[in-house]
Amino acid sequence: MKVLLFSASNSSQSINQTFIEHIAQYIHQHEVTIIDLRFFPAPLYSYDIEQKSGKPLAMVALHNLFSSHDAFIIATPEHNGALPAFF
């Protein structure tokens, strides 16, 4: 099984990303991929821009990563009891 691990934080000092990297050390029987979502910039969606320029390449790459994995482990911070806007 292929497992994708990532943090839903955009902080360069994210404890969630550190946690993900720590957890990955304990997954031995599966193929593990760790990504940093900061390297997949997601612009605000605009139908007009998509029609003119196509889908953002970073989002196509992220979609392909998600599609090629069987499971996800996500560590996310909370902001006032909700998921962070970055996520």
Image (cartoon, grey):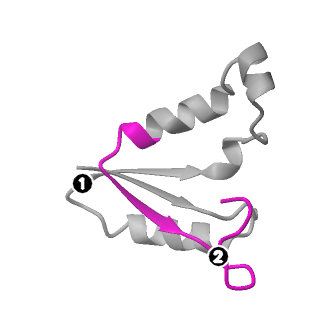
User: Eyeballing the image, is 37 above or below 50?
Assistant: below
Task: State the image coordinates of residue 16 (x, y, percent, origin top left).
Answer: 60, 72
Looking at numbered disc 1 in the image, what kind of residue is underneath it? His
- Left or right, 3 with reference to 75: left
Towards the viewer: 9 or 53: 53
The quadrant where residue 24 appears: bottom left
Task: State the image coordinates of residue 48 (x, y, percent, origin top left).
Answer: 79, 24
Task: State the image coordinates of residue 30 (x, y, percent, origin top left).
Answer: 24, 54
User: Eyeballing the image, is 25 above or below 39?
Assistant: below
Task: State the image coordinates of residue 15 (x, y, percent, origin top left).
Answer: 64, 75
Looking at numbered disc 2 in the image, what kind of residue is underneath it? Pro
The quadrant where residue 8 appears: bottom right
Magenta-colored stretch includes residue 73: yes
Circle 1 crowding by C-alpha within 10 Å: few under 14, some 14–19, many from 20: few
Tell me the mark number nearer the camera, choosing from 1 and 2. Answer: 2
Magenta-colored stretch includes residue 20: no
Q: Main secondary structure of the magenta part?
A: loop
The residue at 79%/24% (across/down) is 49
Towards the viewer: 59 or 36: 59
Q: In this picture, which residue range is highlighted in magenta? A: 66-87
- The alpha-carbon separation of the residues under discs 1 and 2 comes to 26 Å
Q: Which residue is mark 2?
A: 77
Q: Which residue is mark 1?
A: 30
Query: Which one is earlier in the sequence, the residue at label 1 or at label 2?
Result: 1
User: Eyeballing the image, is 24 above or below 43?
Assistant: below
